[in-house]
Each structure stands twice: as structure tokens, then as C-alpha cells.
Image (tube, rainbow, N blue to C red):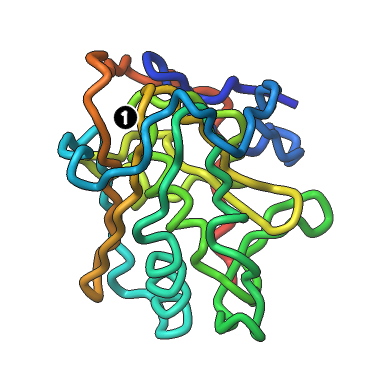
Amino acid sequence: PTRAPPPTATSPALLNGVAPDGTPTRAPATATAAPSATPTSSVQAYDAARLKDKLGSAQTSYAGSIAERAWNVELAAKRLDGTRIGPGELFSFNQAVGPTTLKAGFRVGYGITMDAGRPETVPSVGGGICQVATTVFQAAFWAGLPFVERHYHLYWISRYGQPPSGRTGMDATVDDPGVDLKFKNTTGDWIRLDAWTDGANIGFTIRGVDPGWEVELIKPKVSDVVKANPEM
């Protein structure tokens, strides 16, 4: 199987997700010590008025999605809107969104699974949630925040690579429990995740106090391309 490292703030990898023999590949998670969930007394209290700087933002399109998928995307966005991450704290997508179950309000859409060693798209509760994770991932990437855990899809979905925030290989998949998207707030101050939807697009903006760094991107390297099976 081929493996690719997860993107960094300077070099995202192309993640095609399937080796030539059909074996799925996965970017390894980076293990770090979990920070304390409780800010110390030296950390400033949260003050929305202080978080004036846009550190990173992203937008992807869900236009043309079936009604159930669009519902799931918009519901997850609402649950993430306004999420606060203290300095040194870890953001967990699964924890912030909560259970993606029918009981929690999500509907049956479509998700990706493996069958006989090949990826397939099948009916799945919460289908579409990975587009939300992908958009959060891109916003955090452009904010220059380090990722503690991130996984990519079993196959590349081209709509996730559309500019201005998307690039080839910049996606993220989640599945609660077990597969999460996590990043750490290393800005030295609070940050807030703001979400929006308009019926066709979903967007996230990370606001905080400008830490003074810049994010640069190099062109991805594409290898071991495996064409998708077009049969239903």
C-alpha cells in the first residue's frame, strides 16, 4: 500500500486513498500529548470583541445534493457555529458536532465504505458530514493550525479541491467513533469557529488574534492514480 503524510502548513500531500491493488491507504495520525481542557489562570478570559482577525476561512459547495445530505450538512454546520477553542486546547470535530445518529436529528444520506477490498458509496446515517469536516479542515489549514488527527477519503472527491480554499488532496473524513478531525489552538489566545450555509454552499471562518505567521502552499504531487469504477 502507498502512504502519504497529512498536509502541513507548508506542504499538503495528494491523498488518492487507494493503492493500485485496491487496498485503501490512510494518512497516519500525528500523536501529541493532549493539552489540558481547562485554561490556566494566566490565560485571558474569552472576549469576542478581541477576536477581530480572520485567521483562516474555507468554502465548499453542496449544490445538487439530495435533500437528506443537504440537511445533514446544514445541521452539522449549525452545531459547530460559534465553537470556542481556548489557547492550547484541542478541537475535536466529533466532540463538537455530537452524535451523528437518527435520534440526534441526522438523516440517511450516502457514505463511503469498503466492500471486498474496494471502496463503495452506500446509504449511511449522517451522509454528507465529511463535507463539513473537509471545510473545517481547510479553514484550520489556512489558519496555520497544527493537526493532531486527520484522515482522508478512500477516493478523491473533486468538489473538495475547488479554489479559493480547496486544493487537490485537501479533504478530511470523519466517522464517530474512531475517525476524527483534531487540531490544536497554538495562537496564544482564544479562537472561534463561525459557520454559515446558504442552501448551496457551506463556509467556516476561524477568528482570533493574528499570531503573525503566514501559510504557504506548494503544488501537490500526484501518484498511483486508480480510476474509479463507473458502474452503479
The residue lying furthest to the right in this view is: 116
Q: Indicate the amino acid at tag 1.
A: Ala
Which residue is painted at 30% across and 40% down in the image?
Answer: 166
* Left or right relative to 135: residue 156: right
Count residues near mark 1 (Cα–Cα under 10 Å), then give few for <14, some for 14-19, many for 20+: many
- Position of residue 53 relative to residue 194, above or below, is above
Image coordinates of residue 167 in percent, x first then y, are 32, 34
* Left or right relative to 225: residue 26: right
Question: Which residue is denoted by mark 1 in the rendering?
Answer: 143
Image coordinates of residue 118 in percent, x first then y, are 73, 52
- Position of residue 117 relative to residue 198, above or below, is above
Q: Nearer the viewer, residue 26 or 183?
A: 183
Secondary structure, mark 1, is loop
Q: Nearer the viewer, residue 98 or 102?
A: 98
Which residue is painted at 21% across and 72% down in the image?
Answer: 198
The residue lying furthest to the front in this view is: 41
Which residue is painted at 27% across and 15% down in the image?
Answer: 216
Q: Nearer the viewer, residue 116 or 112?
A: 112
Image coordinates of residue 160 in percent, x first then y, are 37, 48
Q: Nearer the viewer, residue 173 or 20?
A: 173
Identify the image quadrant of the C terminus. bottom right
